[in-house]
């Protein structure tokens, strides 16, 4: 049978170990959403050679970016999402030593680029849904 | 709860082994009480941690009722400036967009159109919330914009325009 002194020292060790394990690891999750999702499906709303700039503005709203070119404008619509997650193993109380850090940042973007001719009619467009590739953590 | 059970078991076993010694049992009971108190304080410190809520607004409010009055081919550039004020492409990029650019969240200057025939108005709203616990932190920022872009023709009349109220999504 263990003596009272031994039991007390076991308890101290147990308490200190519990505190140490609890303080050892921490997890952080961050989310940043910028802009609005693209409001319509470009495949259904855009017809190359027919759809005009006014129709695009009516359906998709104002673009996030416009670039002027010698043969017409370019409209850019963008919706950006940034997911970050961090796992840190550290001793935060006494030594403040970090043993291990895992950090993952995913930034994806839905983007629609529309090229207009000088007459304001669509010449071509490109659409990519990058935010679908984001993993939950 | 696990810590409590461990201490309960320890007290029970100790009682079995030294039931005759009442003083030792009392000491153990006191120890269990102190441990229970310490555990409660520790658990409370885990639960009662920070919660952060932030709101950020930038730019002039775009009055949706006035947007309905814009008539392509009729409304003049002068009227637009009277209704909505000076367009933002004549001002420096908005501070919040500058911060986002610096943080590399937006690669290009969103909502700035340095062209004479385009008038742009933008109202940004950012909702930020964070839960700060000892073992787990969660932060979320949503940035939405009301955006009005007006194209003006060579006669200084509205050619076409686009308006979207993104802040309603917040």
Image: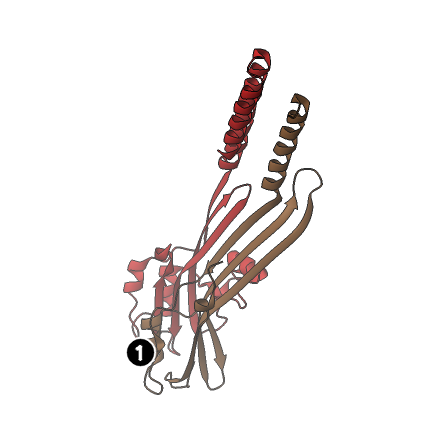
Chain colours: A brown, B red
Q: Position of residue B105 (x, y in %)?
A: 53, 62
Residue located at (50% from left, 59% from top): A83
Asked if one can make out residue B59 in the rendered structure from this viewpoint, the answer is no
Residue B81 visible in this rendered orientation of the protein: yes
- Coordinates of residue B94 in the picture (x, y in percent): 51, 59
Tell me what residue is drawn at x 65 percent, y 32 percent: A13
Q: Is residue A19 above or below residue B158?
A: above
Question: Residue at image x 38%, y 66%?
Answer: B78
Q: Is residue B89 above or below residue B7?
A: below
- Check disc 1: other Cα within 10 Å, few if <14, some if 14-19, many if 20+: few
Q: Quadrant of residue A43?
A: bottom left
Looking at the rendered structure, the secondary structure element under dot 1 is helix
Question: Which residue bears the numbered disc 1?
Answer: A44
Image quarter of residue A121: bottom left
Of B16 and A48, the residue lying toward us: B16
Query: Viewer-proximal residue, A86 or B168?
Result: A86
Residue A84 falls left or right of residue A92: left
């Amino acid at each position: 049978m263990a003596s009272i002194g031994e039991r007390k020292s076991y308890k101290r060790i147990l308490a200190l170990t519990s505190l140490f394990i609890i303080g050892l690891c921490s997890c952080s999750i961050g989310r940043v959403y910028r802009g609005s999702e693209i409001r319509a499906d470009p495949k259904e709303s855009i017809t190359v050679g027919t759809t005009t700039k006014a129709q695009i503005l009516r359906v998709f709203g104002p673009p996030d970016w416009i670039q002027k070119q010698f043969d017409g404008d370019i409209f850019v619509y963008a919706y950006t999402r940034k997911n970050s997650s961090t796992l840190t193993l550290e001793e935060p109380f006494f030594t403040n030593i970090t043993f291990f850090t895992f950090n993952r940042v995913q930034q994806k973007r839905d983007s629609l680029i529309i090229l207009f001719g000088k007459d304001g009619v669509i010449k071509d467009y490109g659409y990519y849904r990058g935010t679908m590739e984001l993993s939950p953590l | 709860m696990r810590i409590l059970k461990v201490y309960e078991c320890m007290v029970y076993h100790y009682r079995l082994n030294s039931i005759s010694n009442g003083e030792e049992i009392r000491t153990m009971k006191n120890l269990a009480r102190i441990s229970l108190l310490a555990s409660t304080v520790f658990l409370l410190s885990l639960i009662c941690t920070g919660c952060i809520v932030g709101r950020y607004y930038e730019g002039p409010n775009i009055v949706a009722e006035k947007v309905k009055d814009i008539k392509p081919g009729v409304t003049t550039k002068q009227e637009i400036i009277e209704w909505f004020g000076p367009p933002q492409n004549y001002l420096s990029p908005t501070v919040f967009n500058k911060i986002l650019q610096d943080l590399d969240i937006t690669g290009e200057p969103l909502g700035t159109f340095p062209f004479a025939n385009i008038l742009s108005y933008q109202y940004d709203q950012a909702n930020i919330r964070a839960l700060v616990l000892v073992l787990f932190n969660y932060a979320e920022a949503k940035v939405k914009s009301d955006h009005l872009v007006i194209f003006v023709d060579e006669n200084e009349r509205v050619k076409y325009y686009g308006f979207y109220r993104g802040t309603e999504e917040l």
